[in-house]
Amino acid sequence: ASNGRPWVDQDLEDDTEVTAKDEEEDDWVDSNEENIPHVPYSPLRYPVEKMLERSQEFYALMNQRRTVRFISPEPVPRDVIDNVIRTAGTAPSGAHTEPWTFVVISDPETKHQIRLIVEEEEEVNYRQRMGDKWVRDLAKIRTNWIKEYLDVAPYLILIFKQTYGILPNGKKKTHYYNEISVSISCGILLAALQNVGLVTVTSTPLNCGPQLRLLLKRPANEKLLMLLPVGYPSSDAMVPDFRRKPLEDIVLHI
Ligand code: IYR
């Protein structure tokens, strides 16, 4: 299916990619930015001691991150959310196309509409689509299709990947590696949330993308990649007592 689109890695391909047929249709343009200047770059360099200390501290911070499904309704400053999304927008992207849209929902009615869509689909997911093995594999996490956090969290951030760009003149622009680019951006977003003491659940609601896209009036080139409810953890939040693999089990030095 990726014939003629060498930037689509077959291992990463899914049915939300632009198809070869879409491409034939019309109106694709080349970048006309070949004259962008190149400028010197010399960021701060740390002494080795400082590097060690910073690497240890950042690891300690990130190692505290947990997926939390119990989110407090307490308000979170909008400026913090803006900065977290600015940070996510620093991710690298294929040919610097920045193929992401972050939709931030605080409106209670819209959050509730999202909850209704997600719970209806998730009930079918758990009862039918996922199958017995998947549901058994999830038992240890104690989840089900009821997602209270979708009403309760002060913000829902829906991250869309732009499968192609649309220029002001209506022409289409290729968004190389859009899925991995937006996924990296989501990872940076998770780190930025952790950095300010907020929590989330990295949810990828199965079969909800099209309905949520329509609810939020997003264009057809945008596909839902992730839905993050964001807030402070509630005071009685619980998480499974998971352990992480030790370094020896995840690294190979050659
Ligand atoms: N999307 C469902 C099911 C689910 C799937 C996986 I894989 C998880 O790690 C957790 C949940 C839900 O959100 O409940």
Image: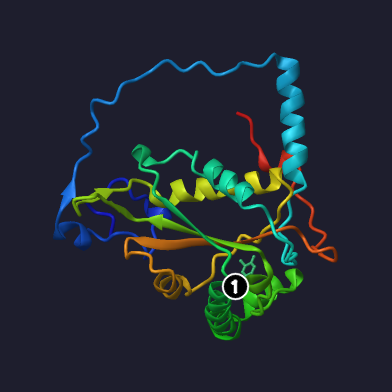
**What residue is rendered at 84% in x and 63% in y?**
235
Pointer 1: residues within 10 angstroms few (<14), some, or many (20+)?
some
Establish if 181 lies above or below 66: above
Image quarter for residue 138? Answer: bottom right
Mark 1 C-beta to ligand 1 under 8 Å: no
Q: Residue furthest right?
A: 236
Looking at this view, is 11 or 209 the one in front?
209
According to the picture, the residue beneath numbered tag 1 turns out to be 108
Three-letter amino acid code at the position of disc 1 = Pro
Q: Residue 187 location, x and y as percent?
A: 58, 47
Say how many tags the image has: 1
Q: How is the image coloured?
A: rainbow
**Left or right of 206 in this view: 77:** right
Q: Say whether residue 75 is left or right of residue 217.
A: right
Q: Position of residue 126 (x, y in %)?
A: 60, 81
Q: Name the quadrant of the C terminus.
A: top right
Which quadrant is the N terminus positioned in? Answer: bottom left
Secondary element under disc 1, as helix, strand or loop, is: helix
Quarter of the rendered image showing ligand 1: bottom right
- Residue 231 x/y as whole percent: 69, 59
Q: Residue at x 70, y 43 (%)?
A: 195
Q: Residue at 72% of width from left, 35% of height from top? A: 58
In-image side of 146 versus 163 (left or right): right
Residue shown at 34%/56% (left/top)? 163
Residue 220 in percent (x, y) is at 32, 65
